[in-house]
Amino acid sequence: MTGAATTSASRSHALSRAGRLLPALGVGAVWFFLLLFLVYPVLRILYDAFSDEAGRLTLANFVEFARDRFYLRSLVNSLLLGLGTVAATSVVGFAVAFLLVRYDFVGRNLFGYLTLIPIVSPPLVGVLGFTFIMGRAGTVNVLLEDWFGLTRPINFVYGLHGVLLVETLHLFPMITLNVVDALAKIDPALEEAAESVGARGFTKLVRITLPLTTPGYVAGALLVFIWTYSDFATPLVLGVHDLLASQAYLNIVQFVDRRLFRMGIVISALMVVLAVLFLMAARRYVAIKDYSSLSYSKVARRRLSPLRQTGAVAFLSLLMLVSFIPYLGVLFASVGKGWSLTPFPVRYTLAYFERVIVETPKYIVNSFLYSALAVVLCIAIGM
């Protein structure tokens, strides 16, 4: 009897130790992952940026960066592009979120799903699709030349304005998602109280509703800014090289000129530092205000009049049409033959899909495999 009790106590003690050990091992694994794949790479970039070829710490690399007018212009352009994208996505994202949360109209649920699609596609797919449809030899310019006798193609996408357009249509769902969540948490009593003292319409929107969405909006705006700020593929496809991300990529991959390689590292370090500063500033801005009045009360949707429903559906339909231009361009390019200086492909074929599936199936398998592994790692670390 005593032996059985001793054995039971030993098992309980072992289970208790295992119960304490497993969480500790999990926390240790997460910290090891973060140190290995986040902290170490960032520290290595900073060390390389602040050191010379002999490994001595120096600020000479940053002094050289500050003296180069092209790099300074790239810095200014990157900041302006990031801020411009945030401004443009804010206007579009707020409008879409406000319509979806506060009003009821035909197709509202459908538009709620459609507005998420642009952010799903990879940025490279989006920019390639835009060049096929709106490039100098794209569908729009060819049609304008055929119909109106245009002698020179209109530059819709090549340049900073094109990058701004592509990034805005790709990233506005980030603002929409965060603002939709924030709008749904606003206590309706606050707006009712504002109306009781005469704040209606635009005044209520600007002074009451929008400020209460600040936490969600700032999170979305920060994601938009950093995404645009660090995207190098979209500007390079559209012929824009005077941006920090583009210069960092071009200088690092050339592997010939050690000075350019070092400047690529310096630009990367500068981008990391600026991103951290923006993150800290955003968190500080949100922290200095009180949003304790937010709640999860359900806000009743107002049924729009037929005329206003038509306007809302027309706006969202036009937005979705422009946002889906990349998919249309990629679709035509993937099944078309002889698409050169013609509005649409001359012939259509599925041979390209057959070639990819039959001759290079490993690319498809690897894409799914690495995506699944990434999802598993994100879930494991995030939990």
Image (cartoon, helix red, strand yellow):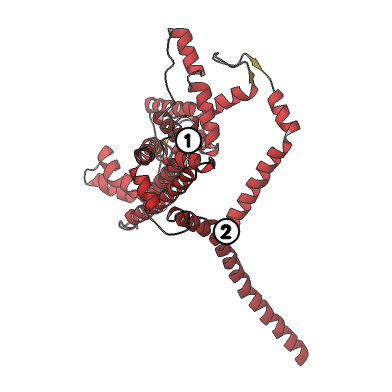
C-alpha span from label 2 to label 1: 27 Å
Which residue bears the numbered disc 1?
170
As displayed, is residue 268 above or below residue 317? below
To which quarter of the image does residue 22 belong?
bottom right
Indicate the position of residue 19 as horizontal and vertical percent values.
63, 74
The type of residue carrying mark 2 is Ile
> Furthest-bottom residue in view?
2
Q: Quadrant of the C terminus?
A: bottom right
Question: How many residues crowd mark 1 within 10 Å: few (<14), some (14–19), many (20+)?
Answer: many
Mark 2 lies on a secondary structure that is helix
Indicate the position of residue 244 as horizontal and vertical percent values.
42, 41
Marked residue nearer the N-terminal end (2 or 1): 1
Task: Determine whether, in the image, residue 190 is placed left or right of residue 17.
Answer: left
As displayed, is residue 96 above or below residue 148? below
What residue lies at 68% left-to-right and 79% top-to-bottom?
14
The type of residue carrying mark 1 is His
Indicate the position of residue 321 as horizontal and vertical percent values.
49, 26
To which quarter of the image does residue 295 belong?
bottom left
Give residue 382's mark: none
Pick the front one: 298 or 113: 113
Residue 299 appears in the figure: no
Indicate the position of residue 2 as horizontal and vertical percent values.
76, 92
CB under 8 Å between discs 2 and 1 = no
Mark 1 lies on a secondary structure that is helix
Pick the front one: 151 or 377: 151
What residue lies at 54% left-to-right and 39% top-to-bottom?
120
To which quarter of the image does residue 37 belong?
bottom right
Give residue 381's mark: 2
Question: How many residues crowd mark 2 within 10 Å: few (<14), some (14–19), many (20+)?
Answer: some
